[in-house]
Image (tube, rainbow, N blue to C red):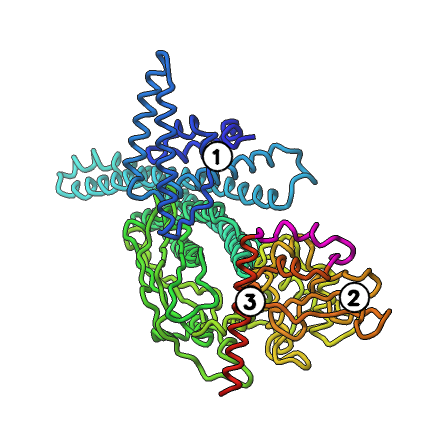
Amino acid sequence: MAVWIQAQQLQGDALHQMQSLYGQHFPIEVRHYLSHWIEGQLWDAVDLENPQEEFKAKRLLDSLIQELQNKAEHQVGEDGFLLKIKLGHYASQLKSTYDRCPLELVRCIKHILYTEQRLVREATNSSSPVGGMMDSMSQKYQQINQAFEELRLMTQDTENDLRKLQHNQEYFIIQYQESLRIQAQLTSLATLPPADRQLREPALLNKRATVETWLTREANTLQKYRLDLAEKHQKTLQLLRKQQTIILDDELIQWKRRQQLAGNGGPPEGGLDILQSWCEKLAETIWQNRQQIRRAEHLRQQLPIPGPIEELLNELNSTITDIISALVTSTFIIEKQPPQVLKTQTKFAATVRLLVGGKLNVHMNPPQVKATIISEQQAKALLKNENTRNDSSGEILNNNCVMEYHQTTGTLSAHFRNMSLKRIKRSDRRGAESVTEEKFTILFESQFSVGGNELVFQVKTLSLPVVVIVHGSQDNNATATVLWDNAFAEPGRVPFLVPDKVLWPQLCDAINMKYKAEVQSNRGLSEENLVFLAQKAFSSSSNNPDDYRNMTMTWSQFNRESLPGRNFTFWQWFDGVMELTKKHLKPHWNDGAILGFVNKQQAQDMLMSKPNGTFLLRFSDSEIGGITIAWVAENPNKAGERMVWNLMPYTTKDFSIRSLADRISDLNHLLFLYPDRPKDEVFSKYYTPPLCKINHYILDLEFRSAISLLLQLEEAN
């Protein structure tokens, strides 16, 4: 069912939230009359952080305006006349608003669609049978929303009590002024003749006694009101702390963990809209309670009454300031991480966001954010508050950015689009560590005020660890460091400690995630593939997966020590396989045509039981990023004897000249892909058309001739 049809069926608060998405920036009538068209566009295909995508956004804007104009033109009748004028007006209004900033239109519509989908999803979950059918996520969200409703009611209750206290105190002050007036009258009686004084004094003394009795009683009542209010505020702050802990220490930390795993190819971390809405509700509730506590303090100062209330209010003030400070500093986050393998002299981007910026009106005085690269040691010192100097480990160009407020989405963020690492200062390396094992981080810091400079916050946040390289040849080793860190980092760790060894199944999960993401395939590594990799990693011959479940692999085994008899590490070999598959073999891997993770002996055992001409494709053991063809055929030197042949491995260089499918087509002795599929049935759809094929063949021959000539010249020299 279309989202808009479901959105119109929302009730209560959900309907109010949906309606609040619309306004002059995007009229609800446009959403209604163009609902089918809007939901059919690829809004997610536009990268909002890339200015180069503006032409896509402009095309969408122009199409939207054209659709509106077409809709207006087709309106007929009396009602249609008014709608025609209205839709035409909206077309002009949207063009005027977004013509110079079409990316903002895309941002606005993406936000609307995402929020509508969330509201519909939440409404569907809440209306479905409770119990086993409601997943844990829905239950958790429901608990958070229930706690917010409880906080709202508690805050409303204390607001009512505060008004009552203020009213009673104002009346008390009036009566107190009355007692002072009576006392002044009694004092003035001394100037009167005794007869007059005796006539008037008893009534005034009576009146004074009555008022003073009332004042004494009412002072005790006011003190009780103040203490009751303070106790209610204590309970509110306890629930606020609990709610904030759930949102910041559970939900936000989980989002950050998902963001880290996304760096290894895990699923996207998900949008921040729900988290931001929760953080904004926290900010709103905290601020309301803070203002109430300050008003209670002001009432106490207006009318000091001896007792424990002063100390209680000081404690409440201190607690609420701690709570809002924790909220603000924790919600200054990195929405889009800088690349974790960072090459010097290369442009890179990042986005930081303050989740409570719009609600606390920080954008009224837009803060500036500064980015600095610091070392692992400097990051440790910073988190221990030992860093008193503005140390850095390099120079980043274009490292200052002002936070911008986006009215349509309510987000306050700074988009660093053109940063570049000009130079890096490395620390002394220890032992076998290489430059590609040294971790840095980008420190983002800012300062802003809340409540008209009432509170000033210094905020800092660290990026995920980055490894700095100066040459592309260092990329695969740097990627290994990042992969290990992303996969095995523990929450709340000291920067940037990771275990030196992990269980083999943990590593399997990490490399399988990375493999599927790099190759962009749903076909991951099978159990047989992982057994092959375990045999390679541990120099083992066991085919039983259970034999490897409790084995551990160290970082040195992963990417420091070379495999036995080779000049490359386990990771370097695996990374070469990924690169080759990603660039040249992806369709064949997805088709299941490449077994890949098979050693030479296994290939021989598999093929010897098959007819001549049967072949399989396996990744080379001896060369990084190579794939070889193994096939069974007669031994030309021994009649009646069969043997398995292995071609020299093909690499990226070979496939950039001629594809794998065409090379298999050229080899007439290859007949069946293991176990028994005719090769043309598997590969023919990837063959190059005949005319192009000849050109590629000539190019291949020319390339080989050139290489041969170079070798001859080299021998001659």
Question: In this orientation, which residue lies closer to the viewer: 268 or 167?
Answer: 268
Under mark 1, the amino acid is: Glu
Q: Residues within 10 Å of mark 3 (few under 14, many from 20)?
A: few
Q: Position of residue 452 (x, y in %)?
A: 28, 51
Task: Identify the residue position indicated by label 1 in the image.
Answer: 39
Quarter of the image where one finds residue 203: top left
- Between disc 1 and disc 2, the foreground one is 2
Choose the circle earlier in sequence order: 1 or 2.
1
Q: Does the stretch in magenta take in 705? A: no
Q: Is residue 308 visible?
A: no
Quarter of the image where one finds residue 551: bottom right
- Between disc 2 and disc 3, the foreground one is 3
Q: Which mark is residue 701?
A: 3
Q: Label 2 vs label 3: CA separation?
A: 26 Å
Q: Position of residue 524 (x, y in %)?
A: 66, 57
Q: Residues within 10 Å of mark 2 (few under 14, many from 20)?
A: many
- Between disc 1 and disc 3, the foreground one is 3
Q: Are marks 2 and 3 in contact (CB under 8 Å)?
A: no
Under mark 3, the amino acid is: Leu
Question: In this orientation, which residue lies closer to the viewer: 108 or 315?
Answer: 108
* Secondary element at image label 1: helix
Q: Position of residue 493 (x, y in %)?
A: 54, 68
Task: Identify the residue position indicated by label 2 in the image.
Answer: 633
Q: Is residue 456 left or right of residue 132?
A: left
Q: Does the stretch in magenta take in 681? A: yes
Q: Is residue 34 left or right of residue 456?
A: right
Q: Residues within 10 Å of mark 1 (few under 14, many from 20)?
A: some
Q: Label 1 vs label 2: CA separation?
A: 58 Å
Identify the residue at the far bottom of this view.
717
Choose the circle earlier in sequence order: 1 or 3.
1
Q: Are marks 1 and 3 in contact (CB under 8 Å)?
A: no
Q: Which residues are magenta?
A: 671-690
